[in-house]
């Protein structure tokens, strides 16, 4: 994207707007004070020089400290040449003397941990603003390459990067300001971002129509077990509350116990093989509330009948260490423990790990967390930060499985349904207030769905795509 933009708009023009945006963000948030701009050798340092020039022009006392000179003849060298203000040594003493330090050392080009000298200077700084990202946060993964207290503001350009959204980098960026620097849309399209912020507009959920009937809204079916009815019932309730036309539980010999539950549920006691013949029942949830034996008795049958299957909880434990057993399912929704037991520890690069897991089993993988990562087998990834710690309560994952089941049953493509389900679940958590019990989420799912439909009509997903710099 940078290269193509460089040819069409001119990298110098983009750098000028980037540096101006940094100066503007600083002036909007801080009173005039002594500023030290730390500049690295690349274009991040070029942005820093432009910001220094604009702050000085606004009458702020500004100094620039250079870690290394910019490459001769490049845009950063031109930006450096246009700054005629005061230069000081790149040192911890100078950083400590400044009221505000602007970190323009490394941005998208960070490719290894910064040296001890760099870190000593940053650690000596009292208040910090980042140009693009803190110089020790990997923009692609959010990995933090060295420890340092958080920044107050990070000013990025065009689109936030995964490193602004994913933990642990997210906690260090402070407020993220994303500046429009006039990057032409064909350059953004050319970059074909494959990582998206999960927002309405990235997907759209069917709205209710006057002629809807329960089968057009969709049927969600669940496999139930004998010993853990709560999880199955929570998933069923999540499916109903998010707009399924009909929710049925295949309970076999436990049917009587489930019939004492919510009156709007249909409980089946017929053998699963017979239920699978009903072509209106295409979406099945398998795993919440099931033991490994119960999964073994159900999941292979569901897959063999070519149903759309969401596998969670017990089904993920059943496939631990052998994720290929899940081939044929449509969506899985592991938390980090389940993911690790299936695929091994994901390491620092969650996006890469979840994407490769999705490719490996040919299913959408939704890794649940404070920021959930949702990957399709074709490589698309959405990051969902639309959530609340209120969701961190037992049974919340069962509710999520039910919500996604509803959206699958409404005919949404698998990845879209998983993304939309994560967003609705997050919205319900945000609406549910403080310390809700899991059942309290259900009351908000209908309004969350209406809100998502409304926002999708108003917003374009383009504004939220994440910029991902591609490396050879
Ligand atoms: N996205 C865009 O279209 C635009 C990007 N701009 C800026 O350009 C930046 C990216 O510029 P660059 O690609 O030049 O990359 P950087 O400016 O981040 O740094 C690249 C240089 O730093 C070196 N380096 C990386 N990590 C190091 C380490 N730990 N220790 C020592 N040296 C290290 C690299 O070898 C390379 O020489 C962005 O972060 C942004 O600030 C803006 O100028 C405007 C337009
Ligand atoms: K930086």
Image (tube, rainbow, N blue to C red):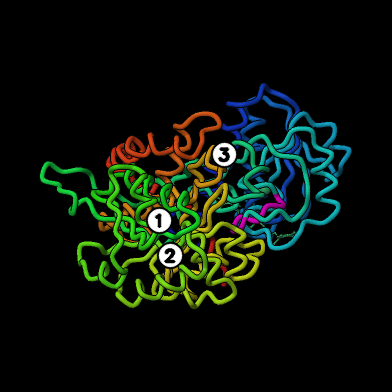
Q: Is residue 10 left or right of residue 62?
A: left
Q: Which mark is residue 364?
A: 2
Q: Is residue 96 left or right of residue 1?
A: right
Q: Which mark is residue 389?
A: 3
Q: CB under 8 Å between callouts 2 and 1? A: yes
Which residue does the image show at 42% across and 56% down from the upper left?
A: 188
Q: Earlier in the sequence, mark 2 or mark 1?
A: 2
Which residue does the image show at 85% across and 34% down from the upper left?
A: 96
Q: Position of residue 166 (x, y in %)?
A: 59, 51
- Please tell me how crowded label 2 is: few (under 14), some (14-19), or many (20+) other residues with Cα within 10 Å: many
Which residue does the image show at 83% across and 44% down from the upper left?
A: 121
- Please tell me how crowded label 1 is: few (under 14), some (14-19), or many (20+) other residues with Cα within 10 Å: many
- Please tell me how crowded label 3 is: few (under 14), some (14-19), or many (20+) other residues with Cα within 10 Å: few
Between marks 2 and 1, how big is the CA–CA gap?
8 Å
SS class, disc 3: helix
Residue 375 visible, this orientation: no
Q: Position of residue 446 (x, y in %)?
A: 32, 38
- Report which residue position mark 1 lands on: 418
Name the outermost residue toward the top. 31
Which corner quadrant of the image does residue 190 belong to?
bottom left
| Stretch of the chain drawn in magenta | 135-141
Residue 450 visible, this orientation: yes
Between residue 416 and residue 326, name the one nearer to us. 326
């Amino acid at each position: 994207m940078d290269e193509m933009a460089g040819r069409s708009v001119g990298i110098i023009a983009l750098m000028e707007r980037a540096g101006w945006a940094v100066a503007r963000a600083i002036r909007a948030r801080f009173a005039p004070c002594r500023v030290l701009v730390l500049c690295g050798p690349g274009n991040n340092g070029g942005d820093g020089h432009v910001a220094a020039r604009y702050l000085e022009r606004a009458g702020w006392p500004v100094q620039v400290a250079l870690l290394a000179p910019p490459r001769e003849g490049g845009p950063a060298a031109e930006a450096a040449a246009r700054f005629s203000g005061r230069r000081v040594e790149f040192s911890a003493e100078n950083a400590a003397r400044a009221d505000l330090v602007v970190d323009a050392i490394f941005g998208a080009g960070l490719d290894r941990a910064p040296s001890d000298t760099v870190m000593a200077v940053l650690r000596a700084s009292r208040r910090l603003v980042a140009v693009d990202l803190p110089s020790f946060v990997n923009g692609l993964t959010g990995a933090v390459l060295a420890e340092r207290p958080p920044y107050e503001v990070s000013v990025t350009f065009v689109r936030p990067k995964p490193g602004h959204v994913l933990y642990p980098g997210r906690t260090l960026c402070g407020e993220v300001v994303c500046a429009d620097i006039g990057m032409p849309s064909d350059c953004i399209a050319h970059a074909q971002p494959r990582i998206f912020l999960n927002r309405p507009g990235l997907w759209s959920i069917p709205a209710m129509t006057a002629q809807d009937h329960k089968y057009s809204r969709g049927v969600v079916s669940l496999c139930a077990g004998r010993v853990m009815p709560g999880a199955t019932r929570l998933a069923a309730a999540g499916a109903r509350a998010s707009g399924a036309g009909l929710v049925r539980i295949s309970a076999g010999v436990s049917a009587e116990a489930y019939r004492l539950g919510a009156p709007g549920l249909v409980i089946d006691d017929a053998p699963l093989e017979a239920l699978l013949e009903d072509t209106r029942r295409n979406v099945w949830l398998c795993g919440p509330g099931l033991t490994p034996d119960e999964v073994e008795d159900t999941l292979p049958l569901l897959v063999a009948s070519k149903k759309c299957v969401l596998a969670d909880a017990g089904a993920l434990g059943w496939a631990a260490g052998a994720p290929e057993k899940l081939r044929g399912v449509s969506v899985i929704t592991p938390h980090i423990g389940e993911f690790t037991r299936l695929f091994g520890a994901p390491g620092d690069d969650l996006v890469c790990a979840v994407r490769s897991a999705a490719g490996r089993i040919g299913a959408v993988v939704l890794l649940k967390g404070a920021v959930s990562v949702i990957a399709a087998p074709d490589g698309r990834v959405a990051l969902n930060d639309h959530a609340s710690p209120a969701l961190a309560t037992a049974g919340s994952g069962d509710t999520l499985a039910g919500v996604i089941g509803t959206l699958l049953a409404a005919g949404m493509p698998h990845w879209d349904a998983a993304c939309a389900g994560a967003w609705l679940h997050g919205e319900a958590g945000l609406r549910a207030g403080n310390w809700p019990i899991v059942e309290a989420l259900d009351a908000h799912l209908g309004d969350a769905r209406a809100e998502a439909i409304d926002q999708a009509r108003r917003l374009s997903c383009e504004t939220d795509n994440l910029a991902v710099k591609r490396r050879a």
